[in-house]
Amino acid sequence: MILLSAAGAPEPRGLQGVRRVFFKDADDIRRKLVHSTAPTSALRASASTFVPTALTQDKDKRADTPTQATVSTATAQEDEPEDDLVPDVETDQEVEKPVDVESLMESLNTSSGSLSEEALAARERAAKIFQKAFRSMLRRKSQFVRPGIPTSRAKQIAAFLEAAKAIQWPPKSYYRFVYSGPLPHLLVCLEWLLSAAMARKTKVKKRATDKTTKHEDLDELFEQQTKLSGTVKQINALREALKAESDVHLRLDLEKLKTYVQQVAELLKQFSPLPGELSFDIEIVYKGIVEERVQVKAEKPVLNVEDIGDDL
C-alpha cells in the first residue's frame, strides 16, 4: 500500500506495511510513481537448451551401437542426393523478454507535460480531496472507543472532569483528586453491575415463564427475581448518590465515600467472576479511596552541639 503525503505533513500513527511518498504537486507524484524500472532478468535469450548429463551419455551409448534399422537407413541416405535431405525441426523456444516500463508508459501517453493548466489544477484538487478524506479517516479511527467497559469509562471520566470545573474546591483538597481520579472508575463498576443484574434478571424471568420449567423450580426462580429486583434498586440508588452532579461530593466526606465503596464491593462479589477489563477500575478505586495514605516525612538533620561546651 502506498500513502501519498504532502511535503512536511506529520507522521501518521498506527500504519504498518505502508510506503510513504512525499510530493509537492501532481507532477511530482508522477515522477516518483511512474519513473520506475522493472527488475532486469538474469536469463539470456541466446543461451542453449539445457540437457541433463545423464541423458547425453545415454544418447551417446545408443549412437555407438548401431542396429539393423540404423544401418539400412544410413545406406539409403548415402544413395539419396543431398538436395532431398529433410530439414531439422527447430526445437528452440521463444524466451519472454522483460517489459520496458518506460516504453509502456510512453505508449499509453500518460505524460502530464501534455496536459493543460486546467487539467493539472483539477488533478491537484482531486489529490487534496483524497488527502483530506484519508486524514479524516485516521482522525476518526484514533478517536474510536470500543463498546462496553471502555465506552463507559470514557463517558464517566468526561462527565466528572466537566462537573469539576463548577465546584469551588478548598485549597489542597484531597477530595478534589479523588473526584477526578478514582471516583469515575467507581461509577464504571456500578454501570457494569447494573447491566449484569438486568441480564441475569431477564434470564431468570425467561426460565420462569418457560412451559418446560418444573413446578418445584418456580418458587426458587421467583425468589431469585425478587432478590435481583432489590439488587437493581440498590445499584440505581448508589449511581444516583455517586454521580458527578450529586450533592454528596460537596461535603468532601471521604469516610462516607469509603462506605459506598464497601457496598459496591459486596455487590461485585455476587456477580463473580468479573471481566478482566473491570479489574483495572477496581484497583484504581481501592488504591485511591480505601487504601490509607502514607505520608513520608523527610528526616531533619541533627545539629551537632558536642563541641560547643569545649569552646566556651
Image: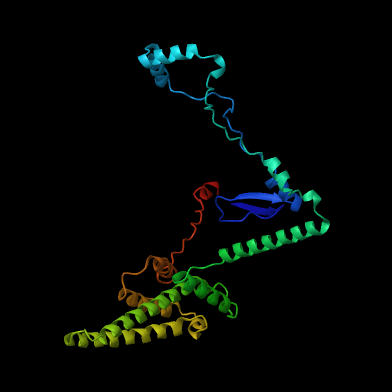
Front one among 102 and 65: 65
**How far across and how far down the image is residue 179, in percent?**
50, 75
Question: Is residue 243 among the parts visible in the rendering?
Answer: yes
Number of marks in the image?
Answer: 0
Report the front residue among 298 and 146.
Answer: 146
Where in the figure is residue 306, as x and y percent of width and height?
Answer: 49, 49
Q: Position of residue 61 (x, y in %)?
A: 38, 14
Point 41% across, 74% down: residue: 189
Residue 2 % position (x, y): 62, 51
> Relative to residue 94, is residue 166 depicted above or below?
below
Q: Is residue 286 above or below residue 85?
A: below
Nearest to the observer: residue 290 or residue 156: 156
For this view, does 60 lie left or right of residue 48? left
Position of 296 compared to 202: left or right? Answer: right
Query: Residue at position x 46%, y 81% from top?
Result: 242
Q: Is residue 169 visible?
A: no
Q: Quadrant of residue 230?
A: bottom left
Residue extending farthest to the right is 117
Using the rendered view, name the quadrant where residue 105 is placed: top right
Q: Which of 52 and 259 lies nearest the eye of the viewer?
A: 52
Q: Name the colouring of the figure.
A: rainbow
Q: Residue at x 56, y 24 (%)?
A: 47
The residue that appears at 51% across and 74% down in the rendered structure is 155
Which quarter of the picture shows residue 166? bottom right
